[in-house]
Amino acid sequence: MKSVLNKINPKDKFIATFILKGALLYLAWFLLYEKWLLKDGWVDNFLINHLVSATAFMLDIFGFITFQYADAVGVDGTHGVLIGHNCNGLSLFALFTGFILIFPGKFIHKLFFIPIGLALIHFLNILRLMGLAIVIVYYPNSLDFNHKYTFAIVIYSFVFFLWFLWVKKFSKE
């Protein structure tokens, strides 16, 4: 058995290990989220409440008169943006964190890169919500397009950039 493993290309070992770790981490996240966090709801609700208040605060800074509800924020005179569990960023946090955890790199670097990355992703999500609230004011017919495509591309491109940065700057060769 050991001789068979020695004949496997190191790149193939890396890819197989990466996929296996990723699958196990996904399973752990799925069980943690579906069986505990989703039912309890406190993490989702905490993120949504913070997104609502932070988005309203940022819109206020830019001179907009805003409203806030439990899971919605917007500019007065509009229907605002409803923030659901799928849009609060939690699954993206898990995806980003999981990639950094399973990809090679020094643990000490992971300890600072993951929180900084999560904070940047969260801030970008606040900017996304601001953008959507402003789109509703000036171009309400384009809300669906911007929600599904424009801002999704921006957010996922940024996460990809963070992964790329990790691989190029912090990961072991």
Image (spheres, helix red, strand yellow):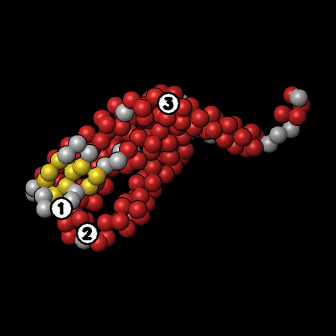
Percent from the top left, x then y, of residue 114? 43, 36
In the picture, measured across the screen, residue 11 lies left or right of residue 161, that is right
Which one is earlier in the sequence, the residue at label 2 or at label 3? 3
Which quadrant of the view contains residue 141? bottom left
Question: Element at badge 2?
Answer: helix
Q: Which residue is mark 1?
A: 78
Q: Amino acid at mark 2?
A: Pro
Which residue lies at the image location 50% right of the left edge and 46% below the top edge? 163
Q: Which residue is mark 3?
A: 35
Determine contact: label 3, label 1, CB under 8 Å: no
Determine contact: label 2, label 1, CB under 8 Å: yes
Question: Element at badge 1?
Answer: loop
Determine contact: label 2, label 3, CB under 8 Å: no
Which residue lies at the image location 24% right of the left edge and 49% below the top edge? 72
Q: Residues within 10 Å of mark 1 (few under 14, many from 20)?
A: some
Q: Residues within 10 Å of mark 3 (few under 14, many from 20)?
A: few
Q: Which residue is mark 2?
A: 140
Q: Above or below — where is 154 with respect to 91?
A: below
